[in-house]
Amino acid sequence: MTRLLTPIPLLTAPTAAGKSALALELAQEFGLEVVSADAFTVYRGLDIGTAKPTPAEREAVAHHLLDVADVSENYDVARYVQEAEAAIAGVLERGRVPLVVGGTTFYLTALLRGLPLTPPADPGVRAAVEAELAQRGLDALLADITASDPAEARRMERNPRRIVRATEVFRRTGQYPGSFGNRPPRFGYAVTAFTRPGPELEARMAARVGAMFAAGWAEEAAWLASQLDPETLPRPTAWQALGYREAWAVATGHLGQSEATARAVLASRQYAKRQLTAMRSQLGAQVLTPQDAIKQVREHLGAAHKASVN
């Protein structure tokens, strides 16, 4: 097995900032293989709304952790870490350099810190919490967590599955998942994070959403609704993908495309803000400009590539 003597390069940025395009450029320049860190490009069939790399891009550069799950599956962080670490090891065994790329900071944090040592789920307690979620609502459960542990509540990022899981674990053990510690990570990582000025980033979000609708996003959301009931609580993982409910509303005639676009862009802005906060607090990253980021990654990749062939 070829061993990389420097940390694995990792590139992250908020949604629509251009990390995938930068990753493709770097991968072609250095002969890299990309390991995705995105919670929704793992799903087969979610291509347009997740801005998944195109078949041509995937032909040009090897990508891992794309299209590995059906939309009916609840793909979780434990499975992601296991499969991502296996993909990284496989790239290294081939004598190549992996580049981890994505914006799902929950997944990236687990790669950097190791998987949480949280107890396995208890289906009975989980079912009771899910019933309570349907009756009391997300905000009530989140308020319960906030009252006990504000830091844990912030870590939930209003994600219903995380909130249900945290509540289940707390009711069984008196502790939240963040209290159980982590197993050691398999690899070390060199994190590079970047963003763009607010107005530029928002313009890119609007352009991306418009392009997605033009490419058939509403039809893709309708297909997803045919596979999974979007009203199920807690919401199936695939329906938590950014903007799909707005796209589905266009498909069903409940929203016009302009209103759906405005809502999707607003949701993207809010998500980008949470991503940037997590990049700084959870990943310990300095958020750079795109120009400084590409310089930093190139410098690290030069050292990593040299180490991998020596």
Image: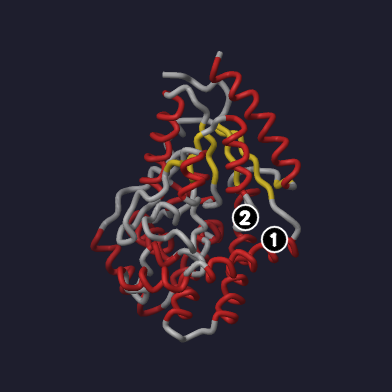
> Residue 165 in the image: x percent, y percent?
38, 59
Location of residue 182 by image quarter: top left
Q: Are marks 2 and 1 in contact (CB under 8 Å)?
A: yes
Tag count:
2
Residue occupying the far top of the picture: 310
Amino acid beneath label 2 = Pro
Tell which of 254 and 55 is nearer to you: 55
For the point 54% across and 50% down, which residue is it? 105
Please give the residue where the numbered disc 1 appears in the rendered image. 201
Image quadrant in which the C terminus is located: top right
How are the colours assigned in the image? Answer: secondary structure
Location of residue 181 by image quarter: top left
Which mark lies nearer to you, 2 or 1?
1
Please give the residue where the numbered disc 2 appears in the rendered image. 14
For the point 54% across and 17% down, which residue is it? 309
For the point 34% across and 57% down, which residue is it? 74
Q: Which mark is residue 83?
A: none
Amino acid beneath label 1 = Leu
